[in-house]
Image: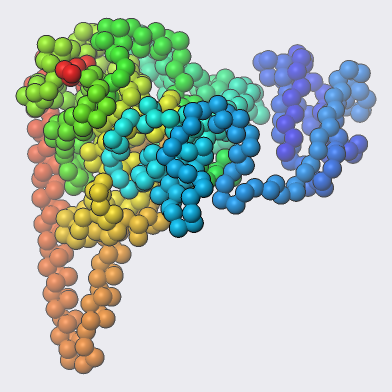
Amino acid sequence: MLAIKVAHCYSVECGNIVIYLNHKEIGKFRMYANEFGEIRTHLNIPSLCDGEHLAAVKIVDERGNDLEPHLYHDVGFVVDTAPKEEEEGHQDLSLIDREINNCPQSFSCSSGSSEDDVICSGHGACMKGACVCFANWAGEECQHPLFENNTYIPDRDPSSLPSACIKSVVWENRTSELRSILLDISERLSCSPQDVLLFEEGRAMVMDGVWNYDACDGLGFACHFLPLSRCSSSDAKAEGAKLHKRMDNIHYDNPQAYDSHFIPPEFASSFHGVLWWRSQLTGFLLRRNERMELILRRIKNQIGYRHPVVGVQVLLRSQQLTQLKEGAGCQPVSAFLKHVEAMHERYGVSRVFLATDDIETIVHLPLDRTMFDSSLFIEYRLMLGYVDSKAVSDSTVTDLLLLAEADYFVGGFGSHFSRISFELSVALKGRVPPYASVDYPWCWHFLEKRPIADEKEEKVVEGGRDGKGKGGRNVLERKNRGGADASDLMALLVGRQRGNGEDEAEDMSKEEREDDRGVGHEEQEHEQEKEQEQEQEQEQEQEQEKEKGKQQQQQGEEEEGERGRGTTDNISHPRSKVMVKVPA
């Protein structure tokens, strides 16, 4: 595909654009300039053989005469489709060998080990004595599966080990190339009719929505972050294009089917998996602007935000809603604190940044954490004056960014907010920091929803979502059958998860029962009658559980309303943050 741009055309009609490929005319268009005096278009070209080629563009009038002698430009290029030789299973690392040589020697592994020795737990490659982990694995010896275990708290801080430099070099490889491509996509777009077509086809990054309050009057996404393009959705609509309908305030129609597991082939490698891809996109989308930098600097100075620090997110109200809707467990504050204590013991960290949506967490936290010095307890939001409901956006964004800056993270990956915070943290650090999730592993929605895997066990506990044995299979067996990720990173939207293993589990249980039956016809009929009775009983139990769930949900909503009314007198903002310190 050829991308054509003609600048400095200020007339209403700028004539016809004629495009040549190897001295043959392949296209002719009548184009109109945008407000910047530019004409832009994209043109599909036929397949070309390997070798040198010449493309040219010029502007002519209606009769085919050159409009101006200088309005002509050509460019030569080379086509080479020969396959590039790569070492099997590895990306060509010759370009980063020099950077790795500048790193200190590590002694986590030895590339000269015998064939019988398992190098890097079988999930990485040994480079200068460091285990560089394959995609979706982490740890000093690549022993931690990101998709299966919900806790990664190694004995030593990974950032203090000699292998940290080597791991970071490989992790950051291709990052600058990806950033340049994303910048080109965002910066080259204007609001010309041609670029509006890209918006309509879902091929451009646009952040919709306007946050109407004094600090961000009409700025929308650009209130906190660098703009994704020169054109907003409102600008595009002003040009007369019919953009995609917004539904239910959380979903957008996308005309192009996408797979959240997909990584473009030019960026996929043995060392770059889904976490690398998502963290790079998240880091690019959430590039804070100058206003946000000033806000964060002021907040850090006021609350004493210093490194090292543990970022903790406690979303009790969100967990309660999830429990009512999906039957998930609601984790107490103590579930978070035990991981904070483990990090304190192993890494000596003495500061904790707490972000929560529940005031009762602030009230009861001193009772649950005798290790904290309550005299240093700071009620973050009150001190900063975040008591106005119009400041929800500022508070949420500062939560996200301060959690991402923390050296260690404790939260619940059942929350999209926690996952985005963690992915942004990975992008900022260029590595996987120690973390703990109180509910699910990272991106558990890539798999079927299932019980939590124990860090020390290879299999999950028996039982599934309903606690009655449904869906309680080995994680490795279910790994490739998970539902698609429905979260839209560009809008940080809440997605619906798909994938239900209950029906399959029931079908398999039926097949197993059929295999165990006798060959006698009477015994089969007797067994069938028993099964029908059991199925009827199960259906009745399910109906009763649904009715009970509805009653619990209604009761929970009423209690939620009463609780909200009881706390709005003191603090009306739905989020609270505190900075606490653990005595050495």
Q: Residue at x 46, y 38 (%)?
A: 130
Position of the N terminus, as image quadrant, is top right
Residue drawn at x 17%, y 43% is 329
Relative depth, front residue between 231 and 456: 456
Residue 514: x and y in percent read 25, 80
Q: What residue do we see at 55% from left, 43% from top?
A: 268
Q: Residue at x 43, y 25 (%)?
A: 428
Corner quadrant of residue 541: bottom left
In the rendered image, the quadrant that contains the C terminus is top left
Residue closest to the eye, 383 or 565: 383
**Residue 264, placed above or below residue 461:** above
Total count of labels: 0
The answer to whether residue 293 is seen in the rendering is: yes
Residue 389 drawn above or below residue 333: above
User: Looking at the image, can residue 136 be seen?
Assistant: no
Residue 219: percent from left, percent from top: 44, 15
From the viewer's perspective, is 71 left or right of 2?
right
- Residue 347 x %, y %: 27, 27
